[in-house]
Amino acid sequence: MISPGPRLFFRIFALSCSLFASAVAVAFGDTVDTSVRTVTKLADGIYTIRHKDAPDTFPQGNTTVIVGEREALVVDSCYLPSSAEEDIAQIRHWTSNPVHFLLNTHWHYDHTMGNAAYRDAFPGLVVVAQTETRKEIAGYNSYWFEHFPGRAERMQKLIDSGKNTEGKALTPNEIQELKTAVGGIQPVWAEFKLLSARLAELTPDVTFEREMIIDLGNREVQLKHLGRGNTRGDALVYLPKEKILITGDLLDHPVPYFFGGYPEEQIATLQSMSLLDAQAIVPGHGDVLHDKVYLQQEIDFISAVVAQVNKAIYRFGSGPDKFDTISEEVSKNLNVDALRNQFAGEDKNNRDFFNETFDGLIRAAHAESWGK
């Protein structure tokens, strides 16, 4: 995603959409807030960049750079064009080979808004995505540019009312975070308004359904769509020789992002992903993982919530008007404190965000079930 600020802003974004020179990575406890740009070297010619949150508190997705003997491929272009430009300058220090491919793992803005910066830097660039992701990027981007200038006014109304978009009272931390976000809107819009006439350049050129294999020159990169989860078109990247897996927002650390999507289907997608032989896992947000423990924790978490949502629906019925009853029943039947401790530990920002994403997971599982 000063918490749950970036995550609060991300939640507001998710709800609205549903309605229509860097430091070497160091060892520290991971949090949902990112204030420093870091780089992690995964192998020779393979690097992951974690970006600091934008001035409007919006979180920026991880970017991974994969360099072959002939050319390079980049996974996700992050949120701010200026951050993408900083990444491009870094890439030029790593290799003189051109970036020929850019994969968008899914449509969310914090993984795609740097696309035009890469096109400017690398003529002949091919932007790749799963078929559904291309449709979603083309469809949602016009909404983004039409509504972004009014975000400050909409957030100020929340501050003035003291309530969130669901009518619940905002905490002092949430109000402060909204104020910070309002103050950061203008510098972000100064970048984005330059893209409003370049929507076609933000849209992927080439799509695939289930799998696409790219040879960068003695380095094979497998692009896979194992099923729906976070979005309809989630793609992951697998490097079989290096045993590296790049997941997009199918997996986020240290607290999963659940503000929509297809939780029941995501269970199967993550289970298929867990069968890949990976020794390093790059999530859509957060630190690089070196085993599958967290992946299994997320599978178990989603499974438990989906099972309880379905059980509650069988008891109370389905439909949007049943959500509050179902949410209360799910929370009563799960050990929420244990789950919060498992994912968030004692970090207050993580704990605040867990509360948001837990509610989001219940909402998504409920919508998925009654919408069938």
Image: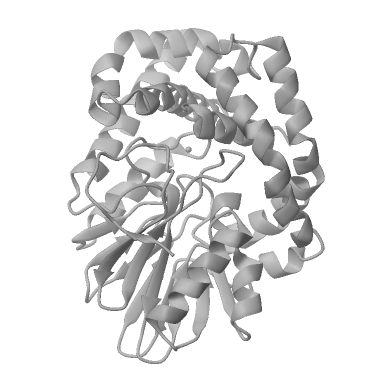
Decide: is 39 above or below 183. below
| Image point (70%, 26%), residue name | 155
Instruction: Give 283 or 91, whichever is nearer the viewer.
Output: 91
Q: In this view, does 123 lie to the left or right of 40?
A: right
Decide: is 323 above or below 251. above
| Image point (71%, 11%), residue name | 161
| Image point (63%, 36%), residue name | 13
Decide: is 242 above or below 263. below
Instruction: Give 160 or 241, whichever is nearer the viewer.
Output: 160
Residue 289 lies, in percent from the top left, at: 24, 51
Residue 121 lies, in percent from the top left, at: 61, 79
User: Image quarter for residue 114?
Assistant: bottom right
Instruction: Give 66 or 303, whichever is nearer the viewer.
Output: 66
Residue 247 lies, in percent from the top left, at: 37, 56
Q: How many labels, in total?
A: 0
Residue 46 lies, in percent from the top left, at: 32, 73
Decide: is 19 above or below 348. below
| Image point (53%, 12%), residue name | 171
